[in-house]
Image (cartoon, rainbow, N blue to C red):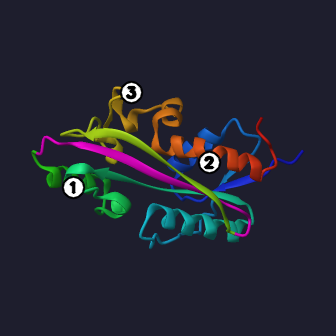
Amino acid sequence: MTLPIITIASGNPKKVAEIEAMLGPLPIKVEKQPSHLNVEETGSSYLENALLKAKAAAKITNTLTIADDSGLEVDALDGAPGIYSARFAESNEAKIKKLLNDIGDNPYRSARLYSVMVLCDQEGNEINHASGICWGEILRAPAYPNGEFESLFWVRETNCTYGELNNSQLSKHGSRGKAARELAPFLLKAIGIKRN
């Protein structure tokens, strides 16, 4: 039996591995998008950006595709950086420095990681989308060196930063994990598996 192929529409190997681990139990073959594909995120929402990526990958690969767009939303910054998280500054180090500088000494440090995940068919039509939120707070300094925003984002439920979560914790508590669980029934239906 040939397993159906699902393409993860992302060039970020860490993100692909995370989503692949979440889809691990399903009878599918997971592939990453072609290396030459680079989609500009010009949407005005997470959903629009995720759709841009999923549609582009579907049209090139002729497979079912999953894409996500995620962002860090800090309450003290009125939800910024949000959909601009990836473009907040030139490097991870600069992003962290800018974020901490923008928050300053504000004691109100609550934040959330927000993810929207979409599933598209082989022609790039949206089958469904789902969202997930992980609540936490921003530390005053990164928990470990050379990290991304995840090194600053403390998840109370797990007593560690988002960047220190293992695959099982990411699936349960992570924003992508929550979105993936919500999307799973639609993926199963798309590959012809009915859940009782």
* Distance CA(mark 1)–CA(mark 3): 24 Å
Q: Which mark is residue 37?
A: none
Give the mark, 1 or 3, whose residue is nearer the N terminus. 1
Q: Which mark is residue 158?
A: 3
Of helix, strand and loop, which mostly describes the magenta segment?
strand
Quadrant for residue 81, please give it: bottom left
> Mark 2–mark 3 contact, CB under 8 Å?
no
* Distance CA(mark 2)–CA(mark 1): 30 Å
Could you tell me residue 159's position as x and y percent? 34, 26
Q: Within 10 Å of the Cα at label 3, are there few (<14), some (14-19), or many (20+) other Cα atoms?
A: few
Q: Within 10 Å of the Cα at label 1, are there few (<14), some (14-19), or many (20+) other Cα atoms?
A: some
Residues rendered magenta in the picture: 106-123
What residue sits right under mark 1 in the picture?
A: 77
What residue sits right under mark 2 in the picture?
A: 183
Could you tell me residue 85's position as x and y percent? 35, 58
Foreground label between 1 and 3? 1
On screen, residue 184 above or below 11: above
